[in-house]
Image (tube, rainbow, N blue to C red):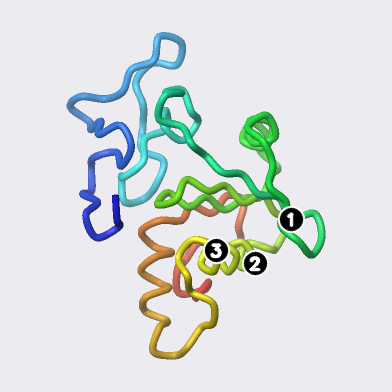
Amino acid sequence: MRHEEIETGICRRCSCNWITPFIDDEYGACWWLDKNRTLCSHCFYEFNDELSQMKVYYRPGRYWLERDKGFAEKILTNPKAHWVYDMEHDVLCVITLGDHIGAVRFIAKKFYGLDCIYREEISKWQEIIAKNMIFYNAMVDDPEHYA
């Protein structure tokens, strides 16, 4: 589903909403994870395994390394972890403190085909970031900051 088609208040993966939420026997009803109300908690935390295709990347130094689902589960349960999640492409980038912008650049280049930031493309970057990315433990989560 492209970001132009996403409707606020409906999960982009399982199509749940406040009237018909995704309900898990162990965790109960889902809740919204992003400001735009387009991704429910149960899809993000993979309680609905059949929908999950999450790609996980980790940057311990200069290069991005692909990791597995077990690594992602450890990170998502750690309240001190730092990460950026792209809802459009189901990508989790685990980073060190202060490298949120590095994750945004990696996602934009690898999954959106945006290599360089040109002045005329700033609004395009801001829209992609605002509609699709979740920042965890970031000092700033304003899309204008990252573009």
Q: Of the residues tagged 1 and 3, which is closer to the observer? A: 3
Which element is circle 2 on? Answer: helix
Q: CA distance from mark 2 to mark 3?
A: 12 Å
Residue located at (39% from left, 15% from top): 24
Identity of the residue drawn at 42% across and 28% down:
42
Q: Is residue 131 above or below residue 14?
A: below
- Count residues near mark 1 (Cα–Cα under 10 Å), then give few for <14, some for 14-19, many for 20+: some
Counting other residues with Cα less than 10 Å from the Cα at mark 3, is it few (<14), some (14-19), or many (20 or more)?
few
**Tag 1: amino acid:** Arg
Extreme residue in the top direction: 25
Q: Position of residue 63 (x, y in %)?
A: 76, 61
Pointer 1 and pointer 2: residues touching (CB < 8 Å)?
yes
* Residue, disc 3: 110
**Image position, residue 78 (x, y; %):** 68, 35
Looking at the image, residue 89 sits to the left or right of residue 10; the answer is right
Instruction: Work out whether 143 lies above or below 23.
Output: below
Amino acid at circle 2: Gly
Reading the image, the residue beneath label 2 is 102
Secondary element at image label 3: helix
Q: Which residue is mark 1?
A: 59
Tell me which label, 2 or 3, sits earlier in the chain: 2
Q: Are marks 2 and 3 in contact (CB under 8 Å)?
A: no
